[in-house]
Image: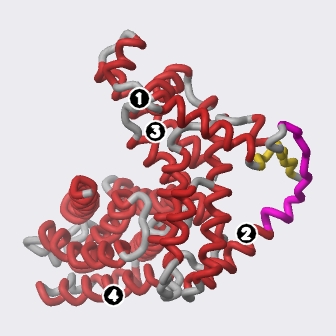
């Protein structure tokens, strides 16, 4: 059984209990919607993409916390799902197909993150939005849990360069290491993150 | 959901064109493998005769038969896994490890054969240019696999390319067991090694093409 926490705009929290059948019913419904979308049904495709975008957002929020790149990643995932929709085979399960794309896009988006100055505002907006949404309790407790799986050095360098948005030079100065050492550390941190995400599959 | 995401969903779902339901990827892999094997056999015969007693040895020498059958099994399984890599979520890490393990087991036979060969080593049936033939005969199947998998959606195109190039390289390498002389050291150096070079070349070419594509974007 999964417990969902719903936080109302007033701040009141309520719990929803979901059986494992719900994720199975998601699986079946999404598979049906995708088959229908493959046949050209626009309405079903729109429903599918809407549900997928919510599920992807919750997945990413639970793994990375409320980061500024979550919306970008959700949108990249939707585009990838659109480009890859011909490869979904209804004889296979839908979730592994979808989440392989989500994981790939998450790492891809993380790699592309560059130094940004105006993140604080965006970050705050995301935090508020995340609170409004329904978030799986298990996941919300472990928000950003994937990052906890990294070594302190890797977590630190990713936080500085990808989440806070410092440049490599700025992160190097803060960590008192060379710029090339920052690049190597970021590369290895993303590699570790990829392995952690793949291990979840 | 943000307004941008809503707009994106609206634009992706408007004027949606139907897409053809895909053939099972395993079937596509087997069709590719069958056509590639037929091509390799045909072109090998075209370039020169096979070892005269090779087919007889397959029947009379159980270890030689085992070695060949193990090669066929390893190549077939790796071909299926390499095509699965072009479908999101279809290839597990375990299946990739199993495929590489089977290939390693097959190749271990030749390493073991250095001290205890399956057949008496002999120069009989030697093809003068087998090393080049192996690489040359592997190229068309590798290119065909590239075009097939490109129409799918490989999340890790380089890994997928290395796997199908490895299969493309090992196909002529395996057939050279029948078409060329039998001596484990010759097989490892002149048939298997070029097969691995094809794998590296395939991976490098696809990496370069992906890099070019990223630069253009």
Q: Nearer the viewer, mark 3 or mark 4?
A: 3
Q: What is the chain letter for disc 1? A: A
Q: Are marks 1 and 4 on the same chain?
A: no
* Secondary structure beneath label 1: loop
Q: Are circles 1 and 3 on residues that touch, CB within 8 Å?
A: no
Say few, some or many: other residues with alpha carbon within 10 Å of mark 2 (under 14 / 14 to 19 / 20 or more): some
Q: In the rendered view, would you say B136 is above or below A180?
A: below
Q: Nearer the viewer, mark 1 or mark 3?
A: 1
Q: Nearer the viewer, mark 3 or mark 2?
A: 2
Q: What is the chain letter for disc 3? A: A
Residue A103 position in % (x across, y down)? 54, 52
Q: Residue at x 80, y 70 (%)?
A: A25
Q: Residue at x 52, y 39 (%)?
A: A68
Q: Residue furthest front?
A: A10
Q: Nearer the viewer, residue A11 or B147?
A: A11
Q: Which mark is residue B35?
A: 4
Mark 1 lies on residue: A117
Q: Is residue B203 left or right of residue A185?
A: left
Mark 3 lies on residue: A191
**Nearest to N terminus: mark 1 or mark 3:** 1
| Residue bounds of the magenta highlight | A11-24
Mark 2 lies on residue: A27
Q: Nearer the viewer, mark 1 or mark 2?
A: 1
* Secondary structure beneath label 2: helix
Residue A152 position in % (x across, y down)? 55, 20
3D distance between C-alphas at marks 3 and 2: 29 Å
Q: Are marks 1 and 2 on the same chain?
A: yes
Residue A177 position in % (x across, y down)? 35, 13
Q: What is the chain letter for disc 2? A: A
Visible residue check, residue A52: yes
Q: Residue furthest left?
A: B128
Q: Is residue A65 left or right of residue B71?
A: right
């Amino acid at each position: 059984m999964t417990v969902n926490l719903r936080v109302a705009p007033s701040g009141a929290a309520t719990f929803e209990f979901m059986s494992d059948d719900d994720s199975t019913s998601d699986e079946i419904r999404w598979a049906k919607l995708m088959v229908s979308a493959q046949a050209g049904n626009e309405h079903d495709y729109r429903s599918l993409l809407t549900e997928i975008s919510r599920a992807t957002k919750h997945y990413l929020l639970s793994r990375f916390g409320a980061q500024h790149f979550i919306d970008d990643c959700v949108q990249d995932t939707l585009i990838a799902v659109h480009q890859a929709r011909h490869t979904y085979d209804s004889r296979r399960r839908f979730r592994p197909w979808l989440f392989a794309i989500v994981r790939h896009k998450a790492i891809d988006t993380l790699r592309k993150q560059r130094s940004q100055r105006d993140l604080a505002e965006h970050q705050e907006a995301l935090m508020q939005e995340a609170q409004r949404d329904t978030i799986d309790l298990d996941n919300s407790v472990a928000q950003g849990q994937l990052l906890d799986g990294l070594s302190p050095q890797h977590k630190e360098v990713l936080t500085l360069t990808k989440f806070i948005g410092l440049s490599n030079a700025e992160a190097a100065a803060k960590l008192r290491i060379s710029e090339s050492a920052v690049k190597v550390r970021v590369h290895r941190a993303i590699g570790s993150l990829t392995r952690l995400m793949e291990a979840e599959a | 959901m943000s307004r941008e995401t809503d707009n994106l969903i609206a634009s992706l779902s408007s004027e949606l064109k139907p897409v053809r339901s895909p053939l099972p990827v395993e079937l596509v892999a087997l069709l590719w493998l069958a056509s590639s094997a037929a091509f390799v056999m045909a072109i090998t015969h075209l370039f020169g005769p096979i070892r005269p007693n090779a087919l007889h040895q397959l029947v009379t020498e159980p270890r030689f038969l085992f070695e060949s059958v193990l090669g066929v099994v390893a190549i077939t399984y790796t071909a299926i896994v390499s095509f699965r890599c072009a479908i999101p979520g279809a290839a597990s890490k375990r299946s990739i490890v199993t495929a590489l393990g089977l290939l390693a087991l097959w190749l271990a036979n030749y390493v073991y054969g250095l001290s205890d060969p399956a057949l008496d080593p002999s120069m009989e049936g030697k093809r003068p240019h087998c090393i080049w033939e192996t690489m040359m005969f592997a190229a068309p199947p590798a290119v065909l696999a590239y075009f097939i998998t490109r129409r799918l959606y490989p999340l890790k195109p380089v890994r997928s390319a290395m796997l199908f190039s490895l299969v493309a390289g090992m196909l002529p390498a395996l057939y050279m067991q029948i078409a060329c002389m039998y001596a484990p050291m010759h097989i490892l150096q002149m048939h298997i090694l070029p097969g691995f070079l094809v794998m590296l070349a395939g991976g490098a070419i696809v990496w370069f093409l992906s890099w070019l594509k990223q630069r253009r974007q």
